[in-house]
Image (spheres, helix red, strand yellow):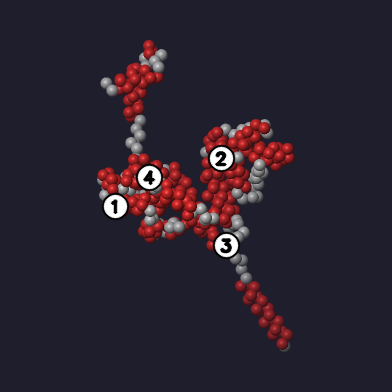
Amino acid sequence: NVGSVLTNYYNTNENRNYNNFCLPKHMTCVAHSLNLIATTDISKISDDNYNRLSKTTFNKLQAFWNLVSRSSVASDKVYEHCKCKFPIPVITRWNSKYDATQKVLIHKKKLDILFDVLKLNKLKPSEWLFLEEYCLLLKPLSNSLDKLQGEKNSYLGYVAPTLIVLRKLLIQSIMQKSKDFILASISHPKFKMSWVPVRYISLCKELFLNECNTFKDENSVSESASDNADSDSSDEFYSNLSGNLTTSFHPSAQDSDSAEIDTSVSNTAGVEALTYLNSKKKELMSLNDVPIVKQIFFKYNTTLPSSAPVERLFSKAIQVLTPRRNRLSDDVFEMLLCCKSNE
């Protein structure tokens, strides 16, 4: 029977093709994950001082945003003073809180006056400082999120480079707090780069080279600035990848990364810095051969702070500031204290 043969053939092939169907591999939304870091994860911070300051600051801003969005009169007053509209944070829009806060900081001086006009609680200096640090911290993450949620370059190939750049920028922001200590140690001939962990060698070396470049003459600085003026924001963001992608995945590949940095340095300050780092001399007198590094050494290698001399000085103050001398002027008291300590 031809009909039964064709039916069996059709059923067999249909079952075979059906068994080949499967769901694609599950992939999380990277942009949404970054947004969760900026919202949900930040809300889990347990520091009482941070939570108190964050709550009072954003409550005042939320009152401003609510008034602007609900009152056309208030909105017109804001536009009259600032000549712009202020974005309102929305939970369903990524980066909306950061963008709204950044806009507020741009018009800080005008809003300080405008809050009085609108009869809103003004932000204190500590709260303005909190907003500046908030935007400074979230700027790399916000830029990364903008790259990943765009429509022009929505390719999977952008994910890994973007995350690597984000990681590097966050590490650099942390290193800025320790910049003085890092440069003080690297500029000391006894230590140089020997104490730096392998995974941070590239970043510390780059920090040192950049510091050396600040001592170049103004002409070279202006030329460098004009050369980089034409690059767009996307190229500027991903320029942080150069010479660091391999190191981020394989810390052992540090030699090749250092070689890339070495070949890219052609200015006098950079060559002098690399000459200093490659030198095996550990005496302080060796700094005379590298005047730029010597200036950095003098700038950052201050005397180690110690409370002992101050405590001894205060102990002598008790002998000077007796009840009968409670009306001494500051200058006379300082003179007597110095004379007493120099006996």
Amino acid type, mark 2: Leu
Local secondary structure at mark 4: helix
- Who comes first in sequence, dot 3 or dot 1? 3
Question: Which residue is at 28% across, 45% downward?
Answer: 288
**Spatial distance from mark 3 to mark 1, Cα to Cα?**
45 Å
Q: Nearer the viewer, mark 3 or mark 1?
A: 1
The residue under label 1 is 279
Question: Going from the N terminus, do you reach mark 3 or mark 4 first?
Answer: 3
Q: Is residue 159 visible?
A: yes
Distance from Cα at disc 2 to Cα at disc 1: 45 Å
Where does label 2 land, which residue? Answer: 131
Residue drawn at point x = 54 percent, y = 55 percent? 232
Distance between the Cα atoms at labels 2 and 3? 33 Å
* Residue 33 visible to an observer of this rendering: no
Badge 1 amino acid: Ser
Whole-percent x, y for residue 207 in the image: 41, 49
| Residue at 27% over, 21% down | 343
Q: Residue at left 39%, top 46%?
A: 215
Q: Which mark is residue 183?
A: 4
Q: Secondary structure at mark 3?
A: loop
Which numbered disc, 2 or 1, marks the residue that appears first in the sequence?
A: 2
Neighbour tally class for label 1: few under 14, some 14-19, many 20 plus, Cα within 10 Å = few
Residue matched to label 3: 155
Q: Nearer the viewer, residue 85 or 246?
A: 85
Distance in Å between CA atoms under marks 4 and 1 = 17 Å
Distance of label 2 from label 4 (alpha carbons): 29 Å
Foreground tag (2 vs 1) = 1
Query: Around disc 3, counting alpha carbons within 10 Å, would you say few (fewer than 14), some (14 to 19), or many (20 or more)?
Result: few
Q: Which mark is residue 229?
A: none
Q: Which circle's residue, 4 or 1, is located before the other in the chain?
A: 4
